[in-house]
Image: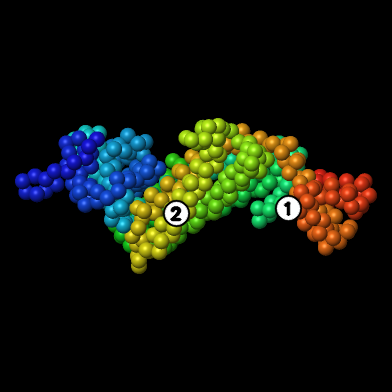
Amino acid sequence: MKHRIETDSMGEMRVPDNALYGAQTARALENFPISGIGFSRPFIKALGNIKSVAASANTSLGKLDASLAGPIRQAAGEVAEGKWDDQFVLDIFQTGSGTSTNMNANEVIAHRATQLASGARIHPNDHVNMGQSSNDVIPTAIHVAAADQLVHELLPSLAHLHAALAAKAEENADVVKIARTHLMDATPITLGQEISGWARQMELGMQRLRSCLPRLGELAIGGTAVGTGLNTHPEFADRVANGLSEIYGIEFAEAVNHFEAQAAQDGAVELSGQLKTLAVSLIKIANDVRLLNSGPRCGLGEISVPAVQPGSSIMPGKVNPVMAESLAQVGAQVIGNDSAIAFAGTTGLLDLNVMLPVIAHNLLESERLLAKAVRVFVDKCIAGLAANRERAASLIEWSMSMVTSLAPVIGYDRAAAIAKQAVAENKTVRQLCLEQGVLPESELDALLDPRGMLNPHG
Protein backbone atom coordinates (compact mmCIF):
# COMPACT_ATOMS: atom_id res chain seq x y z
CA MET A 1 0.00 0.00 0.00
CA LYS A 2 1.25 3.48 -0.85
CA HIS A 3 0.62 5.88 2.03
CA ARG A 4 0.41 9.39 0.62
CA ILE A 5 -1.05 12.11 2.81
CA GLU A 6 -3.12 14.82 1.17
CA THR A 7 -4.85 17.84 2.63
CA ASP A 8 -8.30 19.19 1.94
CA SER A 9 -9.20 22.81 1.11
CA MET A 10 -9.02 23.71 4.80
CA GLY A 11 -5.52 22.27 5.14
CA GLU A 12 -6.73 19.30 7.17
CA MET A 13 -5.06 15.92 6.73
CA ARG A 14 -6.94 13.59 4.39
CA VAL A 15 -6.52 9.86 5.11
CA PRO A 16 -6.37 7.51 2.08
CA ASP A 17 -9.70 5.80 1.41
CA ASN A 18 -8.19 2.32 1.82
CA ALA A 19 -6.50 3.10 5.16
CA LEU A 20 -7.69 1.78 8.50
CA TYR A 21 -5.63 4.29 10.43
CA GLY A 22 -7.02 7.77 11.06
CA ALA A 23 -6.18 11.44 11.33
CA GLN A 24 -3.81 11.21 14.29
CA THR A 25 -1.69 8.60 12.51
CA ALA A 26 -1.81 10.61 9.30
CA ARG A 27 -0.54 13.66 11.12
CA ALA A 28 2.32 11.68 12.64
CA LEU A 29 3.10 10.14 9.26
CA GLU A 30 3.57 13.61 7.81
CA ASN A 31 5.80 14.67 10.70
CA PHE A 32 8.15 11.68 10.94
CA PRO A 33 9.18 10.41 7.48
CA ILE A 34 12.75 9.84 8.67
CA SER A 35 14.21 6.36 8.22
CA GLY A 36 11.57 4.17 6.64
CA ILE A 37 12.12 1.72 9.53
CA GLY A 38 8.90 0.60 11.15
CA PHE A 39 8.14 -1.43 14.25
CA SER A 40 8.80 -5.15 14.03
CA ARG A 41 6.28 -7.96 13.80
CA PRO A 42 6.69 -9.10 17.45
CA PHE A 43 6.03 -5.55 18.63
CA ILE A 44 2.86 -5.14 16.53
CA LYS A 45 1.77 -8.61 17.67
CA ALA A 46 2.23 -7.50 21.28
CA LEU A 47 0.21 -4.31 20.69
CA GLY A 48 -2.65 -6.31 19.20
CA ASN A 49 -2.67 -8.77 22.08
CA ILE A 50 -2.52 -5.99 24.67
CA LYS A 51 -5.53 -4.24 23.12
CA SER A 52 -7.46 -7.51 22.90
CA VAL A 53 -6.80 -8.47 26.51
CA ALA A 54 -7.53 -4.90 27.66
CA ALA A 55 -10.96 -5.07 26.02
CA SER A 56 -11.68 -8.34 27.82
CA ALA A 57 -10.50 -6.90 31.13
CA ASN A 58 -12.59 -3.76 30.77
CA THR A 59 -15.67 -5.83 29.92
CA SER A 60 -15.19 -8.12 32.91
CA LEU A 61 -14.86 -5.03 35.11
CA GLY A 62 -18.10 -3.55 33.76
CA LYS A 63 -16.36 -0.68 31.99
CA LEU A 64 -16.86 -1.68 28.34
CA ASP A 65 -20.04 -3.04 26.78
CA ALA A 66 -19.67 -6.60 25.50
CA SER A 67 -21.17 -5.61 22.14
CA LEU A 68 -18.16 -3.35 21.59
CA ALA A 69 -15.56 -5.58 23.20
CA GLY A 70 -16.23 -8.48 20.82
CA PRO A 71 -15.40 -6.57 17.63
CA ILE A 72 -12.41 -4.93 19.35
CA ARG A 73 -11.04 -8.32 20.34
CA GLN A 74 -11.52 -9.67 16.82
CA ALA A 75 -9.88 -6.65 15.20
CA ALA A 76 -7.03 -6.67 17.73
CA GLY A 77 -6.57 -10.38 17.08
CA GLU A 78 -6.19 -9.66 13.38
CA VAL A 79 -3.54 -7.08 14.23
CA ALA A 80 -1.72 -9.60 16.41
CA GLU A 81 -1.81 -12.14 13.58
CA GLY A 82 -0.27 -9.66 11.13
CA LYS A 83 -3.28 -9.14 8.89
CA TRP A 84 -2.96 -5.35 9.04
CA ASP A 85 0.79 -4.85 9.23
CA ASP A 86 0.68 -2.58 6.19
CA GLN A 87 -1.47 -0.18 8.22
CA PHE A 88 1.31 0.39 10.76
CA VAL A 89 2.98 3.08 8.75
CA LEU A 90 5.00 5.08 11.24
CA ASP A 91 8.74 5.43 11.61
CA ILE A 92 10.43 4.28 14.80
CA PHE A 93 12.04 7.73 15.06
CA GLN A 94 8.98 9.54 16.37
CA THR A 95 7.64 10.82 19.66
CA GLY A 96 9.75 9.29 22.45
CA SER A 97 6.79 7.77 24.25
CA GLY A 98 5.63 5.91 21.14
CA THR A 99 2.29 7.73 21.36
CA SER A 100 2.01 7.91 17.59
CA THR A 101 2.24 4.14 17.20
CA ASN A 102 -0.11 3.50 20.11
CA MET A 103 -2.65 5.72 18.36
CA ASN A 104 -1.88 3.99 15.07
CA ALA A 105 -2.94 0.74 16.76
CA ASN A 106 -5.98 2.32 18.40
CA GLU A 107 -7.20 3.73 15.09
CA VAL A 108 -6.63 0.60 13.05
CA ILE A 109 -8.40 -1.57 15.64
CA ALA A 110 -11.23 0.91 16.12
CA HIS A 111 -11.94 1.31 12.40
CA ARG A 112 -11.70 -2.41 11.73
CA ALA A 113 -13.89 -3.15 14.77
CA THR A 114 -16.46 -0.65 13.51
CA GLN A 115 -16.55 -2.59 10.20
CA LEU A 116 -17.17 -5.77 12.18
CA ALA A 117 -19.75 -4.30 14.58
CA SER A 118 -23.45 -4.14 13.81
CA GLY A 119 -23.89 -0.41 13.33
CA ALA A 120 -21.89 0.63 16.39
CA ARG A 121 -19.10 3.19 16.13
CA ILE A 122 -16.06 2.20 18.09
CA HIS A 123 -13.79 5.03 19.19
CA PRO A 124 -9.97 4.71 19.22
CA ASN A 125 -9.52 6.53 22.53
CA ASP A 126 -12.76 5.96 24.41
CA HIS A 127 -13.03 2.24 23.67
CA VAL A 128 -9.82 0.68 22.32
CA ASN A 129 -7.52 2.72 24.58
CA MET A 130 -9.81 2.52 27.61
CA GLY A 131 -7.86 2.44 30.87
CA GLN A 132 -4.57 2.87 29.03
CA SER A 133 -1.98 5.45 28.06
CA SER A 134 0.82 5.29 25.52
CA ASN A 135 3.08 5.73 28.54
CA ASP A 136 2.16 2.31 29.93
CA VAL A 137 1.16 0.50 26.73
CA ILE A 138 4.46 0.97 24.87
CA PRO A 139 6.71 -0.14 27.77
CA THR A 140 4.39 -3.12 28.19
CA ALA A 141 4.67 -3.97 24.51
CA ILE A 142 8.48 -3.81 24.73
CA HIS A 143 8.55 -6.29 27.61
CA VAL A 144 5.97 -8.62 26.09
CA ALA A 145 7.58 -8.67 22.63
CA ALA A 146 11.09 -9.10 24.04
CA ALA A 147 9.99 -11.97 26.29
CA ASP A 148 8.13 -13.55 23.37
CA GLN A 149 11.19 -13.52 21.10
CA LEU A 150 13.48 -14.61 23.91
CA VAL A 151 11.42 -17.63 24.93
CA HIS A 152 10.11 -18.74 21.56
CA GLU A 153 12.94 -17.82 19.18
CA LEU A 154 16.32 -17.05 20.72
CA LEU A 155 16.52 -19.61 23.53
CA PRO A 156 15.50 -22.49 21.21
CA SER A 157 18.19 -21.40 18.72
CA LEU A 158 20.80 -21.33 21.48
CA ALA A 159 19.69 -24.74 22.71
CA HIS A 160 20.16 -25.99 19.12
CA LEU A 161 23.71 -24.60 19.08
CA HIS A 162 24.52 -25.95 22.53
CA ALA A 163 23.38 -29.44 21.55
CA ALA A 164 25.40 -29.33 18.34
CA LEU A 165 28.53 -28.17 20.16
CA ALA A 166 28.15 -30.77 22.91
CA ALA A 167 27.86 -33.48 20.25
CA LYS A 168 30.95 -32.19 18.42
CA ALA A 169 32.89 -32.06 21.69
CA GLU A 170 32.12 -35.73 22.32
CA GLU A 171 32.81 -36.68 18.70
CA ASN A 172 36.27 -35.07 18.85
CA ALA A 173 37.23 -36.10 22.39
CA ASP A 174 40.11 -38.22 21.04
CA VAL A 175 41.53 -35.64 18.60
CA VAL A 176 44.72 -34.40 20.26
CA LYS A 177 46.00 -31.03 19.04
CA ILE A 178 48.20 -28.23 20.21
CA ALA A 179 46.63 -25.48 22.28
CA ARG A 180 47.57 -21.85 21.72
CA THR A 181 47.85 -19.01 24.18
CA HIS A 182 48.72 -15.52 22.92
CA LEU A 183 48.30 -17.26 19.52
CA MET A 184 51.57 -19.07 20.30
CA ASP A 185 52.11 -22.80 20.73
CA ALA A 186 51.06 -24.09 24.14
CA THR A 187 50.65 -27.58 25.59
CA PRO A 188 48.38 -30.26 24.07
CA ILE A 189 44.61 -30.21 24.33
CA THR A 190 41.89 -32.14 22.55
CA LEU A 191 39.64 -30.57 19.98
CA GLY A 192 36.78 -31.90 22.09
CA GLN A 193 38.02 -29.96 25.10
CA GLU A 194 38.20 -26.74 23.08
CA ILE A 195 34.70 -27.23 21.72
CA SER A 196 33.38 -28.10 25.19
CA GLY A 197 34.42 -24.58 26.22
CA TRP A 198 32.21 -23.18 23.47
CA ALA A 199 29.32 -25.36 24.59
CA ARG A 200 29.68 -24.12 28.16
CA GLN A 201 29.62 -20.51 26.90
CA MET A 202 26.24 -21.19 25.34
CA GLU A 203 24.95 -22.92 28.46
CA LEU A 204 25.91 -19.91 30.56
CA GLY A 205 24.50 -17.54 27.95
CA MET A 206 21.12 -19.23 28.16
CA GLN A 207 21.22 -19.04 31.95
CA ARG A 208 21.97 -15.32 31.82
CA LEU A 209 19.12 -14.65 29.42
CA ARG A 210 16.61 -16.70 31.41
CA SER A 211 17.57 -14.74 34.51
CA CYS A 212 16.12 -11.60 32.85
CA LEU A 213 12.61 -13.05 32.53
CA PRO A 214 11.33 -12.09 36.01
CA ARG A 215 12.09 -8.41 35.31
CA LEU A 216 10.76 -8.59 31.75
CA GLY A 217 7.64 -10.18 33.17
CA GLU A 218 6.78 -7.04 35.13
CA LEU A 219 4.43 -4.95 33.00
CA ALA A 220 3.80 -1.21 33.13
CA ILE A 221 0.16 -1.57 32.05
CA GLY A 222 -2.22 -0.01 34.55
CA GLY A 223 0.04 2.95 35.35
CA THR A 224 -1.56 5.10 32.62
CA ALA A 225 -0.02 8.58 32.25
CA VAL A 226 2.58 8.79 35.04
CA GLY A 227 2.21 5.58 37.06
CA THR A 228 -0.65 6.64 39.31
CA GLY A 229 -3.25 4.59 37.47
CA LEU A 230 -5.48 7.56 36.71
CA ASN A 231 -8.64 6.60 34.72
CA THR A 232 -8.20 2.86 35.10
CA HIS A 233 -9.71 0.22 37.37
CA PRO A 234 -7.42 -1.05 40.16
CA GLU A 235 -7.86 -4.65 38.95
CA PHE A 236 -7.27 -3.83 35.28
CA ALA A 237 -3.48 -4.36 35.22
CA ASP A 238 -3.63 -7.74 36.92
CA ARG A 239 -6.29 -9.00 34.51
CA VAL A 240 -4.34 -7.80 31.47
CA ALA A 241 -1.14 -9.45 32.74
CA ASN A 242 -2.98 -12.73 33.34
CA GLY A 243 -4.51 -12.61 29.87
CA LEU A 244 -1.13 -12.02 28.24
CA SER A 245 0.35 -14.89 30.26
CA GLU A 246 -2.26 -17.22 28.79
CA ILE A 247 -1.57 -16.06 25.23
CA TYR A 248 2.22 -16.28 25.38
CA GLY A 249 2.78 -19.05 27.90
CA ILE A 250 5.09 -16.69 29.79
CA GLU A 251 4.58 -15.45 33.34
CA PHE A 252 3.61 -11.78 33.27
CA ALA A 253 2.50 -9.69 36.24
CA GLU A 254 1.63 -6.12 37.12
CA ALA A 255 4.74 -4.07 37.85
CA VAL A 256 5.69 -3.95 41.52
CA ASN A 257 6.17 -0.20 41.16
CA HIS A 258 4.53 1.59 38.23
CA PHE A 259 6.70 4.67 38.64
CA GLU A 260 9.83 2.59 38.03
CA ALA A 261 8.18 0.73 35.16
CA GLN A 262 7.46 3.94 33.25
CA ALA A 263 10.25 6.27 34.29
CA ALA A 264 12.98 3.70 33.58
CA GLN A 265 13.73 0.94 31.11
CA ASP A 266 16.22 -0.99 33.22
CA GLY A 267 14.68 -4.34 32.31
CA ALA A 268 15.28 -3.72 28.62
CA VAL A 269 18.79 -2.43 29.31
CA GLU A 270 19.54 -5.54 31.38
CA LEU A 271 18.35 -7.89 28.63
CA SER A 272 20.34 -5.96 26.03
CA GLY A 273 23.43 -6.29 28.19
CA GLN A 274 22.99 -10.05 28.29
CA LEU A 275 22.46 -10.10 24.52
CA LYS A 276 25.75 -8.22 24.20
CA THR A 277 27.47 -10.82 26.39
CA LEU A 278 26.03 -13.53 24.18
CA ALA A 279 27.25 -11.68 21.09
CA VAL A 280 30.77 -11.55 22.56
CA SER A 281 30.63 -15.32 23.19
CA LEU A 282 29.45 -16.01 19.66
CA ILE A 283 32.15 -13.81 18.12
CA LYS A 284 34.76 -15.70 20.13
CA ILE A 285 33.43 -19.03 18.82
CA ALA A 286 33.20 -17.72 15.26
CA ASN A 287 36.76 -16.44 15.38
CA ASP A 288 38.05 -19.73 16.82
CA VAL A 289 36.39 -21.57 13.96
CA ARG A 290 37.99 -19.18 11.47
CA LEU A 291 41.45 -19.66 12.96
CA LEU A 292 41.27 -23.44 13.28
CA ASN A 293 39.94 -23.66 9.71
CA SER A 294 42.57 -21.28 8.29
CA GLY A 295 44.65 -22.46 5.37
CA PRO A 296 43.86 -25.03 4.21
CA ARG A 297 47.59 -25.56 3.62
CA CYS A 298 49.28 -22.42 4.88
CA GLY A 299 47.27 -21.80 8.06
CA LEU A 300 46.38 -23.89 11.10
CA GLY A 301 44.10 -26.21 9.15
CA GLU A 302 43.17 -28.34 12.17
CA ILE A 303 39.48 -28.40 11.22
CA SER A 304 37.45 -28.08 8.04
CA VAL A 305 34.05 -26.43 7.78
CA PRO A 306 31.58 -26.84 4.93
CA ALA A 307 32.31 -24.88 1.76
CA VAL A 308 29.06 -23.04 1.19
CA GLN A 309 30.12 -20.67 -1.59
CA PRO A 310 33.16 -19.58 -3.63
CA GLY A 311 35.33 -17.29 -1.56
CA SER A 312 36.97 -15.06 -4.12
CA SER A 313 36.15 -13.38 -7.39
CA ILE A 314 39.84 -13.46 -8.40
CA MET A 315 41.43 -16.47 -6.65
CA PRO A 316 40.05 -19.70 -8.10
CA GLY A 317 39.29 -22.46 -5.61
CA LYS A 318 39.43 -20.22 -2.55
CA VAL A 319 36.71 -20.99 0.00
CA ASN A 320 36.16 -18.75 3.00
CA PRO A 321 34.50 -19.45 6.40
CA VAL A 322 31.58 -17.22 5.49
CA MET A 323 29.13 -18.56 8.08
CA ALA A 324 31.52 -17.69 10.91
CA GLU A 325 32.06 -14.25 9.38
CA SER A 326 28.31 -13.72 9.12
CA LEU A 327 27.81 -14.64 12.77
CA ALA A 328 30.61 -12.29 13.87
CA GLN A 329 29.00 -9.41 11.95
CA VAL A 330 25.69 -10.06 13.68
CA GLY A 331 27.55 -9.94 16.97
CA ALA A 332 29.01 -6.56 16.03
CA GLN A 333 25.52 -5.25 15.23
CA VAL A 334 24.18 -6.47 18.57
CA ILE A 335 27.03 -4.76 20.44
CA GLY A 336 26.17 -1.55 18.57
CA ASN A 337 22.48 -1.96 19.37
CA ASP A 338 23.34 -2.36 23.04
CA SER A 339 25.16 0.97 23.00
CA ALA A 340 22.06 2.65 21.58
CA ILE A 341 19.82 0.95 24.16
CA ALA A 342 22.12 1.83 27.05
CA PHE A 343 22.13 5.47 26.02
CA ALA A 344 18.37 5.44 25.50
CA GLY A 345 17.97 3.96 28.96
CA THR A 346 19.58 7.06 30.45
CA THR A 347 16.73 9.23 29.14
CA GLY A 348 14.25 8.27 31.83
CA LEU A 349 13.73 11.94 32.52
CA LEU A 350 11.69 12.31 35.69
CA ASP A 351 8.54 10.24 35.10
CA LEU A 352 8.92 8.76 31.60
CA ASN A 353 11.61 7.34 29.39
CA VAL A 354 11.42 9.22 26.09
CA MET A 355 13.34 6.89 23.79
CA LEU A 356 10.96 3.94 23.93
CA PRO A 357 10.70 3.36 20.16
CA VAL A 358 14.45 3.16 19.63
CA ILE A 359 14.76 0.78 22.60
CA ALA A 360 12.01 -1.40 21.15
CA HIS A 361 13.57 -1.48 17.69
CA ASN A 362 17.14 -2.25 18.75
CA LEU A 363 16.25 -4.77 21.44
CA LEU A 364 13.95 -6.79 19.22
CA GLU A 365 16.36 -6.55 16.30
CA SER A 366 19.17 -7.95 18.45
CA GLU A 367 17.04 -10.91 19.50
CA ARG A 368 15.86 -11.56 15.96
CA LEU A 369 19.31 -11.37 14.39
CA LEU A 370 20.89 -13.60 17.02
CA ALA A 371 18.14 -16.21 16.78
CA LYS A 372 18.40 -16.45 13.00
CA ALA A 373 22.19 -16.21 12.73
CA VAL A 374 22.77 -18.87 15.39
CA ARG A 375 20.45 -21.36 13.72
CA VAL A 376 22.09 -20.82 10.32
CA PHE A 377 25.56 -21.12 11.89
CA VAL A 378 24.63 -24.48 13.40
CA ASP A 379 23.05 -25.91 10.27
CA LYS A 380 25.59 -24.64 7.73
CA CYS A 381 28.82 -24.66 9.73
CA ILE A 382 28.93 -26.54 13.03
CA ALA A 383 26.97 -29.52 11.77
CA GLY A 384 29.60 -30.14 9.08
CA LEU A 385 32.69 -29.26 11.12
CA ALA A 386 35.32 -32.02 10.85
CA ALA A 387 38.73 -32.54 12.44
CA ASN A 388 41.85 -32.80 10.29
CA ARG A 389 43.45 -35.43 12.51
CA GLU A 390 46.77 -35.87 10.68
CA ARG A 391 47.38 -32.15 10.53
CA ALA A 392 46.63 -31.76 14.24
CA ALA A 393 49.00 -34.60 15.16
CA SER A 394 51.86 -33.23 13.04
CA LEU A 395 51.62 -29.79 14.61
CA ILE A 396 51.88 -31.28 18.10
CA GLU A 397 55.19 -32.93 17.30
CA TRP A 398 56.62 -29.67 15.96
CA SER A 399 55.52 -27.54 18.90
CA MET A 400 58.35 -26.26 21.09
CA SER A 401 55.90 -26.25 23.99
CA MET A 402 56.21 -30.02 24.18
CA VAL A 403 59.31 -29.31 26.24
CA THR A 404 57.02 -28.20 29.11
CA SER A 405 56.60 -31.80 30.29
CA LEU A 406 60.39 -32.16 30.55
CA ALA A 407 60.87 -29.16 32.84
CA PRO A 408 60.05 -30.96 36.12
CA VAL A 409 62.70 -33.58 35.25
CA ILE A 410 65.54 -31.60 33.65
CA GLY A 411 64.79 -28.13 35.03
CA TYR A 412 63.20 -25.02 33.55
CA ASP A 413 66.39 -23.41 32.25
CA ARG A 414 67.64 -26.48 30.38
CA ALA A 415 64.14 -27.09 28.98
CA ALA A 416 63.99 -23.47 27.74
CA ALA A 417 67.40 -23.82 26.09
CA ILE A 418 66.28 -26.99 24.30
CA ALA A 419 63.12 -25.25 23.06
CA LYS A 420 65.08 -22.32 21.64
CA GLN A 421 67.63 -24.60 20.01
CA ALA A 422 64.86 -26.73 18.48
CA VAL A 423 63.40 -23.63 16.83
CA ALA A 424 66.80 -22.35 15.68
CA GLU A 425 67.78 -25.70 14.11
CA ASN A 426 64.28 -26.50 12.78
CA LYS A 427 64.11 -29.74 14.74
CA THR A 428 61.47 -31.25 16.98
CA VAL A 429 62.02 -31.31 20.73
CA ARG A 430 62.06 -35.10 20.60
CA GLN A 431 64.65 -35.15 17.83
CA LEU A 432 67.00 -32.75 19.64
CA CYS A 433 66.66 -34.55 22.98
CA LEU A 434 67.54 -37.88 21.35
CA GLU A 435 70.58 -36.35 19.64
CA GLN A 436 71.82 -34.90 22.92
CA GLY A 437 70.93 -37.91 25.06
CA VAL A 438 68.98 -35.72 27.44
CA LEU A 439 66.94 -38.70 28.76
CA PRO A 440 66.63 -42.39 27.96
CA GLU A 441 64.39 -42.88 24.92
CA SER A 442 61.70 -44.76 26.83
CA GLU A 443 61.45 -42.03 29.48
CA LEU A 444 61.51 -39.34 26.82
CA ASP A 445 58.68 -41.03 24.90
CA ALA A 446 56.57 -41.24 28.06
CA LEU A 447 57.12 -37.57 28.93
CA LEU A 448 56.47 -36.37 25.37
CA ASP A 449 53.30 -38.44 24.92
CA PRO A 450 50.70 -35.68 24.38
CA ARG A 451 47.92 -37.82 25.81
CA GLY A 452 49.71 -37.85 29.13
CA MET A 453 49.52 -34.05 29.25
CA LEU A 454 45.77 -33.86 28.66
CA ASN A 455 44.60 -34.91 32.11
CA PRO A 456 47.58 -34.74 34.49
CA HIS A 457 45.41 -35.33 37.54
CA GLY A 458 43.41 -38.08 35.80
* Of residues 280 and 220, the one drawn nearer to the viewer in this rendering: 280
- Mark number displayed over residue 336: 2
Does residue 356 sit above or below 45 in this rendering? below
User: Residue at horizontal 38%, vertical 49%?
Assistant: 361
- 202 vs 350, left or right, is right
- 12 vs 97, left or right, is left
* Of residues 449 and 384, the one drawn nearer to the viewer in this rendering: 449
Q: Earlier in the sequence, mark 1 or mark 2?
A: 1
Q: CA distance from mark 1 to mark 2?
A: 34 Å
Residue type indicated by callout 1: Ala
The quarter of the displayed image where residue 191 is located: top right
Q: Is residue 184 visible?
A: yes
Residue 63 x %, y %: 29, 49
Residue type indicated by callout 2: Gly
Does residue 225 sit above or below 195 in this rendering? below
User: Residue at horizontal 88%, vertical 49%?
Assistant: 435
Q: Is residue 105 visible?
A: no
Q: Residues within 10 Å of mark 1 (few under 14, many from 20)?
A: some
Secondary structure under the numbered disc 2 in the rendered image: helix
Residue 384 x %, y %: 61, 33
Residue 234 x %, y %: 37, 56
